[in-house]
Image: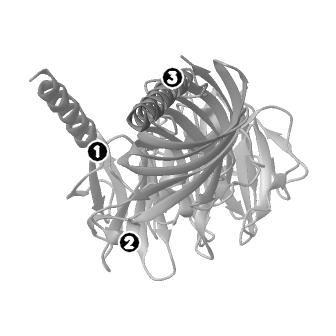
């Protein structure tokens, strides 16, 4: 009788253990299913295109006036917070001597983006080349462009916002006396379409 | 393989683009710019002359300023008509209008018409700085010197003369405006070659070639003379040695020359005292088409 009671107790215990395990499996399954459907504003593989216009504010060299900057970029999320892509810009500014300075920067850009509710804060760094023109002169050189933005995702596939960036354009020549680095702020509005 | 070809194509294109560009300082040149003044002399500068410590400029209207002042131009009293030439001798100022009427004045206020036989084609003076200064007029008939309202036919004069300089003892006429006189020599350009000599009929080749010459002047910066040649693309400076012989081309005056008139067509070029005046035409935009001035005491170019 004692043996019989011990056997029953063991069976009950095992059954409870099995049911407990089955229940855990069910819960895990439910949890995995939920994770598959978690909503994120951006996920790996998402694309977006950005189109913007900005004021082009020369800080250095002196003698330049406020100009304009138009930009267009394509970017892809490598993971939900990081996107990589490229952009092209057309910028110009006039000078006090009645001349025009043009530049067309082509940059590869990495973007780390914070999200908060419907808002996104992209921090990015662009690196590339800039074709510059002034009177009859051209320069083909490096450009760096750190940038910060603030966007409102007002629809699932559209966001609008503002950005502030700094264009750093060094000019290096054989005669080092002519070497200068241009610093230009650009701040303006952009609209992004998320594919 | 396809990617490699694409990269090669991009690199080749970049190299070609880079090689084809005029790689000269940009930010450096922008730093040297100066804010442009508002133009007082508007339109074409046709001619200038010095008269009684003042400079006069013919530019449709007649403008005047103190000959030592930096800028300071103002409209002068002028006879009716579109003024295209101004010239002077020691006591009289002359202007020629587009409708070929010649006027003279002793004070640049009261003007009297000068009558002359034939149709007037040109008015100029010999740029002498003393009593030898004389104004001349060419007509369809002859070349005349002017003295107030009187005209004297120049014996053997060429009615196609367009300019004159004074070499210290004689007036030398030229059929082009490409003639200038320094302290030691006379300069001209023939077939793009800079020529010089003591006498215009006996000039020698300096070995310096300047293409597209439009105008000419000799400038003294206080230490030495330089020959300035206005061309279809800026001003070419020719260094002169102590004997006035052209030796080489040099760097044009003015820290902002590259960003102002270096690429423009210099139709008219004058030098008075420590200043240079150039009428520059920008064929791409009218923004820079102006009379520009450079002063030793203000070593940059700006709009007059």
Q: Position of residue B69 (x, y in %)?
A: 74, 70
Chain letter, disc 2 residue: A
Is there one chain holding both mark 2 and mark 1?
no
Taking the spot 67% from the left edge, 20% from the top edge, the residue there is A158
The answer to whether tags 3 and 2 share a subunit is: yes
Whole-angstrom CA distance, mark 2 to mark 1, is 38 Å
Residue receiving disc 2: A177
Q: Is residue B126 visible?
A: no
Whether marks 1 and 3 lie on the same chain: no
The span from disc 3 to disc 2 (Cα, nearest Å) is: 74 Å
* Residue matched to label 3: A26
Helix, strand or loop at label 1? It is strand
At a point 58% along the width and 59% down the height, the residue shown is B33
Q: Residues within 10 Å of mark 1 (few under 14, many from 20)?
A: few
- Residue found 17% across the figure and 33% down from its top: B12
Of badges 1 and 3, nearer the viewer stands: 3
């Amino acid at each position: 009788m004692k043996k019989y009671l011990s056997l029953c107790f063991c069976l009950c215990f095992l059954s409870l253990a099995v049911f407990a395990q089955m229940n855990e499996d069910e819960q895990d399954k439910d949890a995995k299913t939920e994770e598959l459907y978690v909503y994120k504003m951006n996920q790996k593989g998402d694309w977006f295109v950005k189109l913007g216009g900005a004021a082009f504010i020369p800080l250095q060299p002196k003698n330049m006036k406020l100009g304009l900057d138009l930009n267009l970029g394509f970017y892809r999320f490598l993971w939900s917070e990081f996107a990589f892509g490229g952009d092209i810009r057309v910028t110009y500014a006039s000078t006090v001597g009645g001349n025009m300075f043009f530049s067309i920067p082509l940059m590869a850009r990495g973007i780390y983006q914070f999200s908060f509710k419907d808002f996104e804060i992209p921090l990015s760094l662009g690196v590339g080349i800039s074709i510059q023109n002034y009177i009859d002169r051209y320069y083909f050189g490096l450009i760096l462009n750190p940038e910060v933005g603030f966007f409102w995702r007002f629809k699932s596939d559209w966001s609008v916002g503002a950005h502030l960036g700094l264009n750093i354009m060094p000019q290096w020549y054989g005669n080092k006396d002519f070497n200068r680095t241009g610093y230009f702020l650009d701040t303006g509005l952009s609209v992004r379409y998320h594919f | 393989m396809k990617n490699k070809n694409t990269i090669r194509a991009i690199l080749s294109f970049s190299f070609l683009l880079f090689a084809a560009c005029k790689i000269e300082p940009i930010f450096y040149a922008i730093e040297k710019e100066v804010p442009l003044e508002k133009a007082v002399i508007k339109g074409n500068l046709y001619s200038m002359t010095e008269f009684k410590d003042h400079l006069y400029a013919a530019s449709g209207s007649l403008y005047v300023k103190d000959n030592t002042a930096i800028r300071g131009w103002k409209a002068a009293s002028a006879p009716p008509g579109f003024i295209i030439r101004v010239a002077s001798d020691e006591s009289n100022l002359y202007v020629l209008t587009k409708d070929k009427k010649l006027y003279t004045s002793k004070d640049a206020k009261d003007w009297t018409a000068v009558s002359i036989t034939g149709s007037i084609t040109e008015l100029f003076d010999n740029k002498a700085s003393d009593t030898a200064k004389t104004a001349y007029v060419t007509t369809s008939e002859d070349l005349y010197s002017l003295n107030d309202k009187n005209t004297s036919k120049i014996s053997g004069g060429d009615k196609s003369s367009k300019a004159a300089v004074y070499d210290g003892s004689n007036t030398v006429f030229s059929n082009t405006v490409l003639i200038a006189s320094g302290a030691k020599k006379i300069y001209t350009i023939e077939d793009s070659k800079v020529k010089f000599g003591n006498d215009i009929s006996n000039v020698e080749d300096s070995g310096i070639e300047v293409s597209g010459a439009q105008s000419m002047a000799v400038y003294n910066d206080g230490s030495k003379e330089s020959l300035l040649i206005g061309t279809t693309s800026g001003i070419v400076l020719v260094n002169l040695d102590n004997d006035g012989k052209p030796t080489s081309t040099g760097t044009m005056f003015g820290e902002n020359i590259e960003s102002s008139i270096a690429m423009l067509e210099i139709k008219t070029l004058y030098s008075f005292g420590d200043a240079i005046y150039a009428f520059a035409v920008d064929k791409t935009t009218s923004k820079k088409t102006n009379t520009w001035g450079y002063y030793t005491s203000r070593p940059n170019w700006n709009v007059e």
